[in-house]
Image: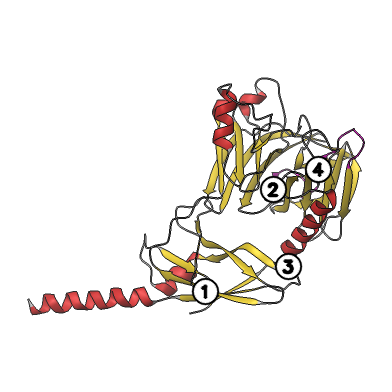
Amino acid sequence: MKKLGLFCMVCLLLAACSQTKKIEVTVTNPSDIDRTVELVEIPWQAVAGKLGLADGMQVVVTDPSGRQLPYQLVKNGEEQVQSLLFPATVGAWQSVVYSVAPGTPETFSPHVYGRFVPERKDDFAWENDRAAFRMYGPALQATGEISNGIDLWVKKTGNLVIDKWYKDDLAGVASYHADHGEGLDCYKVGRTLGLGALAPFANDTIWLGNNFVKYEVLDNGPLRVTFRLTYAPFDVAGEPVAETRTISLDAGNQLNKVVEHFDMQAPRLAVASGIVLRPEEGGVTAFDAQGGYAAYAEPETADGIIYAAMVSPASFTDVKTACGHLLALGEYEQGAGYTYYTGGGWSRAGFETPESWFAYVKDFAARVQQPLTVKVGR
C-alpha cells in the first residue's frame, strides 16, 4: 500500500509539473507596417517535444496579457499534426512574446470553411470571414459549361454562408445572385481565368484547362482551409500538360495562397495568373511587377464595385493587359511549385473606393514579402 501511495504521489507531482510547463514564442515584425491578427506558424514537434505532450493532449495559446487566442493544429493532409497556427499582432519593428502551455482551450468559432458541393454540379466552394470563392467540377463540365477560372462571392458579413446560400438557392427560397443582406454572387467567370487563376502562357496566348476532376481537403479550420484540386491533361501549344492546384485561405485575408504544379515535358514553362477585364468603361488597374502586385477595380454596377488582385512573394516577370485579362507573368520550373496569391473584395464590405483596395493590395504584398519571424524558446 505504501508503494502504491508513493506511486500515486509521484504521478500527481508529474502531472502538476506538466501543467506549469510553457514555452515562449517570440514573433518579430521586420517591416515598417503594423501587423494585426496575422497568422504565424511553428512546427508542432517543437511544441510537443518541449512541453512533453502525449498524443491527444491540448494546449492553450496566450498573448502577453494572458488572453487566450484561437489556434489550429495543421495537418496538411497528413495523419500527424505538422504545425501550430495562431494569430499575432505586432507593431512595426517590434517583437511580441506569446506563450504555449498544456491545458484545455476555450471554444472558438471557425472563421474558414470549405467543401465539395455535389448538389450543385460538383462545385468546390470555400470561404473565410471576408469573402467566399468557388471552382467548377466534372458534373458542370458534363453539361458543356467548361471553366477552370476562380469565382468570387462577395460578403458583408463575417458569418460563414456557403451552406446557407447553396441550400436556399437550390430550394428556391433565395437566389445567391441577389443580395439578401449578406452579399451575393455577381461575379462573372465564363471561359476565362476569372479571379486570378493561373495558366500556361505560350505564343502570346493563355492556355485554359478544363474543370477539376479530383479534390482533396487537407485542412478545414478554424483559421485556415486548405484543399487540392487536380486537373486532367490539356493542350498547351501542342503538348499535354496536367495541373494541380493547392489553395489555402486564412482567416481575415482577402487573398488566397495558391501553389501550382504542372506535369509537363519541358523543363520550364511561362505562366500567367490573370484577372478577366470587363468591356464596359470605368475599370481601373494598378500594378507594379517589381513590387509583386497587380490589382483591378471593375466598372461600377448596381451591385457596387468588385475588386480583384494578384500578389507574388517576390516579383512578377511582367504585368500587362492581353487576351482580355490583366496578366501577371512568371516562370514555372519542372518539379517546383509556383506560389502566388489571388483574391478579391467589394465596395460594400470595407473598400469604398478603388484607391482603398489598391492600398490594401500593396500592403498585402509588402507583408508577404517581409513575413513575420518566429522563434520558439523555453
Separation of disc 1 and disc 4 at Cα?
A: 44 Å
Q: Which residue is mark 2?
A: 260
- Which numbered disc, 3 or 1, marks the residue closer to the eye? 1
Q: Earlier in the sequence, mark 2 or mark 4?
A: 2
Q: Does the magenta run of residues contain 366?
A: no
Q: Earlier in the sequence, mark 3 or mark 1?
A: 1
Would you identify the image quadrant in which residue 283 lies? top right
How packed is label 2: few (under 14 Cα within 10 Å), some, or many (20 or more)? many
Proximity of marks 1 and 2: CB atoms separated by less than 8 Å: no
- The disc placed on residue 65 is 1
- Which numbered disc, 3 or 2, marks the residue closer to the eye? 3
For the residue labelled by badge 3, is the local secondary structure a helix, a strand or a loop? loop
Would you identify the image quadrant in which residue 80 lies? bottom left
Above or below, 223 relative to 48:
above
Instruction: Give the residues in magenta.
Output: 255-283
Q: Which residue is mark 3?
A: 370
